[in-house]
Image (cartoon, rainbow, N blue to C red):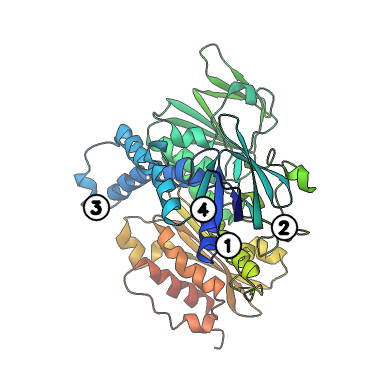
């Protein structure tokens, strides 16, 4: 490609990068994305898609076994090889031809290589063969380089060559045993998946599971993992990692004990992929998260934007896409002189990042949440009321599975009588989440929610029960 100038340059062609380029093009601008790995990024090949493919078969099998009549018909065990083969289909066998075709159909150009900022609206692209191309943007450069697994500073850990989330989601067989360091989303989901495969899983966490969510979520997930045979060691941290004579991983823990397994997965957080993208050339610090305002523009710059994980606002694929839509649209508006709607909840801002982020953890049971937890709401200064209800007590849940176990919580702002947050824990609660998200984002008054009648007998009856527990505000 001989072209060297576009309206918008996007460094990183993951899901957020693709979306910001698409919105810019739809707004009448030209755009190019730069990618050194696979177009589609982490979610498509090493995160949400392969991880959910690995989880789904075990969840489906256990769901069938939880319903009388279906239970009696289930005579076989999970076909682990078939699970991995199904996962490969969802990753297109780590081939991005389909994603590249989509870029072409959307009118977005692609440059293969590593993008590095060299100055204002200027980027150098270094291809795999070492050739370099200097390109410039007329209006904006967008950083969408994502995040990578964080490797804690534990003696011997990096040298032992453990798995990160990438290796866990792209493995082609299940190890006999697996140690997991970290009790967050990646740790609990991969513990669920590999325990389903028959792997002996030990999860080591210094705090409670899923610590950013409501406490009961981690408690119910811990019970579910233990039912799958997972050993959970909480309140401990590794002090050293070594390889034994049979090449197993051995963790020395700070309580004086040790644990070992044939594989080790490190799932202790994420770090921004900004170490070598030229941030120093524009006065920013390499290796840092990129701070942005709600229009996704970096303070102090009229041309630099960032979307997705690299902003550290909400490290979730759907939030990255949401940010990308806002950023692409506002870049186009500013470039063409169109009105910019940057007020809260306007077309050109990512307001939901602050207090209305939906998330599903695909453990068994699932955890679906949106908005603020009770602790976060109190910390933010809200006067709240917390309403809990056992999901297993509603007709829809008891029909869904025998001995259904789960819980729901809504956090209500008593001053305005609107919901600040909702959490569901239980089998298949993910499909309840969008209704909760609409209620939180729309700030729907509790009085009005009484008129949103849930169909009977469905899981959505939980809304009626939560409202009954709360009581009519006007009564």
Residue where numbered disc 1 is placed: 328
Identify which residue, 282 or 229, lies in the foreground: 282
Left or right of residue 235: residue 35:
left
| Residue at image coords 61%, 73% | 345
Q: Position of residue 370 (x, y in %)?
A: 54, 63
Residue at 56%, 14% (x, y): give it: 244
Q: Pick whichever of labels 3 and 2 is earlier in the sequence.
A: 3
Mark 4 to mark 1: distance in Å?
Answer: 10 Å
Q: Name the disc covering residue 298, or none.
A: 2
Q: Between disc 4 and disc 1, whose residue precedes?
A: 4
- Is residue 76 or residue 43 the one in the foreground? 43
Mark 4 to mark 3: distance in Å? 45 Å
Distance between mark 2 and mark 1 Cα atoms: 14 Å
Residue where numbered disc 4 is placed: 18
Report the quarter where the C terminus lies.
bottom right
Q: What whole-number distance in Å separates the C-alpha atoms at marks 3 and 2?
A: 56 Å
Q: Secondary structure at mark 3?
A: loop
- Distance Cα–Cα, label 2 vs label 4: 19 Å
> In the image, residue 56 lies at what x, y percent?
37, 46
Q: Which residue is mark 3?
A: 68
144 and 128: which is toward the camera: 128
């Amino acid at each position: 490609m001989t072209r060297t100038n576009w309206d918008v340059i996007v460094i990183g062609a993951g899901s957020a990068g693709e979306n910001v380029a698409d919105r810019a093009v739809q707004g009448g601008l030209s755009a190019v994305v730069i990618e050194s790995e696979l177009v589609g990024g982490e979610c498509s090949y090493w995160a949400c898609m392969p991880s959910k493919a690995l989880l789904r078969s075990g969840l489906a099998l256990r769901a069938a076994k939880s319903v009388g009549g279906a239970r009696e018909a289930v005579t076989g065990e999970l076909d682990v090889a078939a699970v991995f083969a199904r996962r490969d289909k969802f990753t297109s066998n780590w081939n991005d031809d389909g994603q590249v075709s989509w870029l072409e159909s959307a009118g977005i150009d692609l440059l293969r290589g590593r993008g590095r900022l060299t100055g204002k609206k200027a980027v150098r692209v270094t291809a795999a063969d070492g050739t370099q191309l200097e390109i410039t943007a007329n209006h904006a450069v967008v950083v969408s380089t994502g995040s990578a697994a964080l490797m804690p500073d534990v003696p011997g850990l990096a040298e032992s060559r453990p798995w990160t989330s990438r290796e866990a989601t792209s493995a082609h067989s299940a190890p006999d045993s697996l140690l997991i360091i970290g009790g967050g989303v990646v740790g609990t989901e991969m513990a669920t998946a590999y325990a389903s495969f028959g792997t002996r899983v030990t999860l080591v966490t210094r705090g409670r599971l899923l610590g950013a969510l409501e406490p009961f979520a981690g408690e119910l997930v811990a019970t579910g993992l233990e039912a799958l045979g997972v050993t959970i060691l909480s309140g401990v941290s590794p002090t050293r990692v070594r390889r034994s004579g049979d090449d197993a991983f051995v963790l020395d823990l700070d309580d004086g004990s040790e644990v070992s397994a044939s594989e080790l997965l490190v799932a202790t957080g994420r770090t921004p992929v900004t170490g070598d993208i030229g941030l120093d050339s524009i006065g920013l610090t390499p290796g840092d998260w990129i701070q942005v305002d709600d229009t996704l523009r970096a303070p102090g710059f009229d041309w630099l934007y960032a979307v997705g994980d690299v902003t550290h606002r909400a490290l979730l694929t759907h939030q990255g896409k949401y940010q990308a839509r806002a950023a692409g649209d506002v870049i186009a508006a500013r470039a063409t002189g169109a009105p910019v709607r940057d007020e809260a909840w306007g077309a050109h801002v990512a307001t939901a990042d602050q207090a209305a982020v939906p998330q599903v953890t695909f453990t068994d049971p699932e955890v679906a949440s949106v908005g603020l937890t009770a602790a976060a709401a109190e910390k933010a200064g809200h006067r709240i009321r917390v309403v809990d209800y056992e999901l297993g007590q509603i007709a829809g849940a008891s029909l869904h599975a025998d001995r259904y176990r789960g819980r729901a919580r809504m956090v209500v702002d008593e001053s305005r009588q609107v919901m600040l947050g909702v959490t569901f824990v239980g089998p298949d609660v993910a499909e309840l989440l969008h209704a909760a998200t609409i209620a939180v984002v729309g700030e729907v008054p509790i009085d009005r929610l009484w008129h949103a009648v849930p169909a009977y007998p469905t899981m959505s009856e939980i809304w009626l029960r939560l409202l009954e527990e709360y009581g009519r505000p006007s009564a």
